[in-house]
Every structure is written in structure tokens, then in C-alpha cells.
Amino acid sequence: MVMDDSTDLLPIGMRVLAVDDDPTCLKVLETLLRRCEYHVTTTSQAIMALNMLRENKDKFDLVISDVHIPDMDGFKLLELVGLEMDLPVIMLSAYGDTKLAMKGISHGACDYLLKPVRLEELKNIWQHVIRKKKSDSKGKNKTNKPDNATSDSCSGLRSAGTENSDENGRLAKKRKDQDEDEDEVKENGNDNEDPSAQMKMRLIEQVLKN
């Protein structure tokens, strides 16, 4: 799909599948779509449209379908296209029923147009395709994006573990140094004992022996 240089940014070659059981309405719709320079494929049957989409999943950018089609409810077609192909779908109706329009939107329609469709409206339907592609792209990026919170949490745990290990090492070294200092004090205490006191003890021992 190529963007034109005109002021309305009309995309050239967008692939549209048009579905309407009314031959006259379908022909008018096809003519208007071609005037927008879209590539148009038409069918009067919803089942045929569904088969075409299933056989050529990557050959259409957008589906525009009438709500009332004899062989299949337009809302059912909308639902199946959304589930299987995930393509933007525009619903058409000759009735300006608000409830019907809301039903279409709630079932996944990206727009709801009233017949007769105007050329100006069809010139803007490419925006639904672009919006859909951007939405899908954002969804993929979000899915593939690493979980920073989890990564930060793991980093925090590793950091805490390292700090605890270092602290335990420092405490063990401190206890070892204290033990060595105590032993040294004891040894020094014995070495520094008063010589006269030692002499007295030896004299007492000799007297007792005699």
C-alpha cells in the first residue's frame, strides 16, 4: 500500500473486499472504491467472501460488508473475520438504526456507514487499516519487551547477596583478629610477669622440698 502525494494522503492500491447482496449497491460501491484507486474484489455472498478470505489471508487489507445478507448474518461474518483474519471490517446499512450501529461496533466493526455511501467517506477508510497495523505493532512490542521490574528485582537480590557475603566475611575476619589478640595478650602476660615473684615461688618450692 503506497501513500499518494495528494493533500488527502490517499493510499494507492489498498486491497478491499466488498460484500453486498444488492447488485446495484455493490456496483456503485465498487465504482466509488475504484475512484479512490483501491484494488477492489466484490461478491454478493457472505459465505463466498469468507472462503475467499480463508484462501487468501494476506491478499486483503479491509472488508466492507452490508449488514443484511441472506446467506449469512453480516454480524456473523464480522465475527468470523475478526477471529480468523483479524482484518478491519466496515459495516454498511440502509437503516440509520442507532442500536444496530452500536451492535456492529460492539461486535468489532471499525466503522458503520449508511447507504448511499459517499465518496468522501470511502477516501478515509484507509485510516482504519493504518490504525489496525499500528495497534498490532504496539501489541507485539509490548509482548517482546523485557520485564524491567523483574530484571531490577533480580539485580537487587544479587546485590543484596553480595553485600551479605562481604559483611559475613568481614565479621569472621574481625572475630579471628580478636582471638589472635587475646592469645597474644595471654602470652605477653606470662612473659611480663614480675621476676621477683617468680624467684619467691622457686625459693618456696625448694624449702618445701627440703
Image (tube, grey):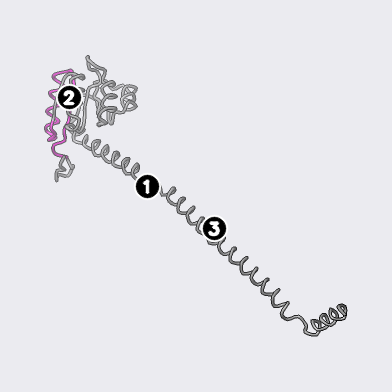
Give whichever of discs 3 and 2 has the lower sequence position.
2
Point out residue 95 in the picture as x, y percentages from the top left corner.
Answer: 27, 20
Examine the rendered structure and indicate whether residue 10 appears above or below residue 182.
above
Examine the rendered structure and indicate whether residue 200 appears above or below residue 103.
below
Q: Quadrant of residue 180?
A: bottom right
Point out residue 94 in the picture as x, y percentages from the top left corner.
Answer: 24, 21
Residue, far bottom? 196
Q: Which residue is painted at 14% across and 44% down in the image?
A: 6
The CA distance from mark 3 to mark 1 is 28 Å
User: Which range is magenta?
Assistant: 11-39
Q: Which residue is painted at 28% across and 20% down in the image?
A: 76
The quadrant the N terminus occupies is: top left
Neighbours of disc 3 within 10 Å: few (<14), some (14-19), many (20+): few
**Residue annotated with mark 1:** 146
Residues marked 3 and 1 touching at CB (< 8 Å): no
Point out residue 189 in the picture as x, y percentages from the top left corner.
Answer: 72, 77
Neighbours of disc 1 within 10 Å: few (<14), some (14-19), many (20+): few
Relative side of 165 to 8, left or right: right
Q: Tag 3: residue type?
A: Asn
Task: Between residue 70 and residue 178, name the one nearer to us.
Answer: 178
Q: Tag 1: residue type?
A: Pro
Residue 114's mark? none
Q: Quadrant of residue 138?
A: top left
**Residue annotated with mark 3:** 164
